[in-house]
Image (cartoon, rainbow, N blue to C red):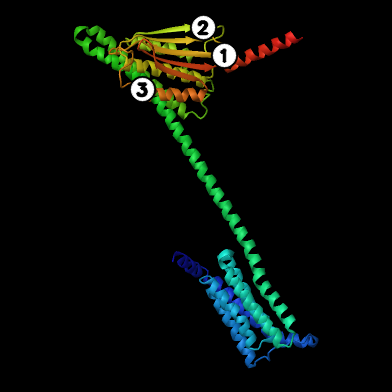
Amino acid sequence: MGEAEGSQSSAGAGRPVDLVVAGACGALALAALAVAPALAAADPSAGLTLPDPGGLGWWLGAATLLAQAGLLLLRRTAPRAVLLAVAAGVPVAVACGLGDASGVATLAVLVAVLTLGLARPLATSWPAYAATAVLVAVGITLAGLDVGGSTAEAVGAGVLQGIGTVGLPLVVAALLTARRETRQARESQAAAMAREQDALLAAAVARERTAMARELHDIAAHHLSGIAVMTAAIGTQIDTDPAAAKESVELVRRQSKAVLGDLRSLVGLLREQDPGQRGDGSAPVRPESLAGVSALVDDAITAGRDVHLRVLPGEHPLGAGVGPLAQLAAYRMVQESLANAARHAPGARAEVVLDDRDRTAAVVTVRNEAPLGVRSDGSTPAGTGGFGLLGMAERAELTGARLDHGPTAEGGWQVRLRMPREALADDERAGDERAGEGEDR
């Protein structure tokens, strides 16, 4: 039903074209029929047998040709039926007495075969093509016998005419169909590429949103955990020690300003067209590095938490060979770990260790002692899950670092990040190669 409706709608849409095709086909057939006697008179040696112009046979033949042209108006609605009908017009034209002019009746057949070839696949339409070839062959064979030709010549001409009338337009239809399918394939490929680009863009936007969410989570968790600890102390100090309460209020104000400052930095970074330059053209100051870890520890100590920093320096400057993105990952790891320690192990001692002695990697470790309420088996209380560790793992994977975390034997918690050094490792390999070359010499 849907196919029939689609065919009818396409027929309605192509009605002006169908009128032109049908009119042109009828006009050409009648013109050929009218000119044929003049051509035969010009070359009497050809011996053509043609109907007398204006005679009954001539008018019956002309009516047959016009009926074929009229059937072409329905070629889009019912292409198979139209093809068989116009093919039947070939033997009918022979019966009307057109003689050697019967071949003019194959003009409408050519148009009908081309239409069916463009509309339907060969696998489903081959019976109609075979019947058409038979009808044309029979008509041309009868025409050859009527004009006095031998049976072999008449049959041979009929078979060739039947095969050619069906085969030639089918070849043209196949070429046109191949071009159409190629164009559709290119359009589909272009649409698929556009959808793929949209999907990649959506995925990139989602990753950026996730990264921003992680940054906001780390900033807020670090500062708000300190504010929560200080406000809890203010509640007890406001009556017993007003001076200390005022100091705590000042610390809360500082922490709040720090939150706003970090948020402004993040928003400013997102607004910059070139993240590597500031408005004045100079390189921006990035405190989110290994050098900025000491400020995180100082903030935690100022908030009244028991946090210690231990730096194990190497022969090179702190963090040498570690990229800025990896140092940012380490900074966020320390920030999130201290926030988690304050939230899940309040009052427990925490330690931050910056081990910069290895020439191939820098190691940052944050560990805290057992919180209150630790069970006898050394496991920590439940309810310590969250997205902080997931964010640390994502940053570590992005920078090629290795993140390890888990409970300690004493019932505390430890997070360890190992960041490879690219520059120093390359220099060390180059030095080893030069030393090996020297030994070879």
Indicate whether 2 appears above or below 87. Answer: above
| Residue at the extreme left of the image, as rendered | 239
Name the amino acid, label 3.
Ala
Q: In the displayed structure, does residue 259 sit left or right of residue 38?
A: left
Marks 1 and 2 in Cβ contact (< 8 Å): no
Q: Which residue is mark 3?
A: 220
In the rendered image, residue 21, in percent from the top left (x then y), is placed at 59, 73
In the picture, which quadrant includes the C terminus? top right
Whole-percent x and y of residue 410? 36, 10
Q: Amino acid at mark 1?
A: Thr
Residue at the (44%, 13%) spot, across then down: 365
Q: Quadrant of residue 429?
A: top right
Say which element carries label 1.
loop
Relative to 266, does residue 66 appear above or below in the rendering?
below
- Regarding residue 285, the answer to whether it shows in the image is no
Which is nearer the N-term, disc 1 or disc 3?
A: 3
Which residue is at a point 25% across and 14% down the rendered structure image? 232
- Amino acid identity at mark 2: Pro
Of the numbered discs 1 and 2, the one sitting upstream in the chain is 2
Rendering coords of residue 436 (x, y %): 70, 11
The residues bearing labels 1 and 2 have C-alpha atoms spaced at a distance of: 14 Å
The residue where tag 1 is placed is 360
Q: Secondary structure at mark 3?
A: helix
Disc 2: CA contacts within 10 A as few (<14), some (14-19) or many (>=20) = some
Q: Which residue is the site of mark 2?
A: 313
- Taking the image as shown, residue 363 lies to the left or right of residue 338, namely right
Ranked by sequence position, the earlier of labels 3 and 2 is 3
Give the image location of residue 15, x and y in percent: 52, 71
**Circle 1: is it few (<14), some (14-19), or many (20+) Cα within 10 Å?**
some
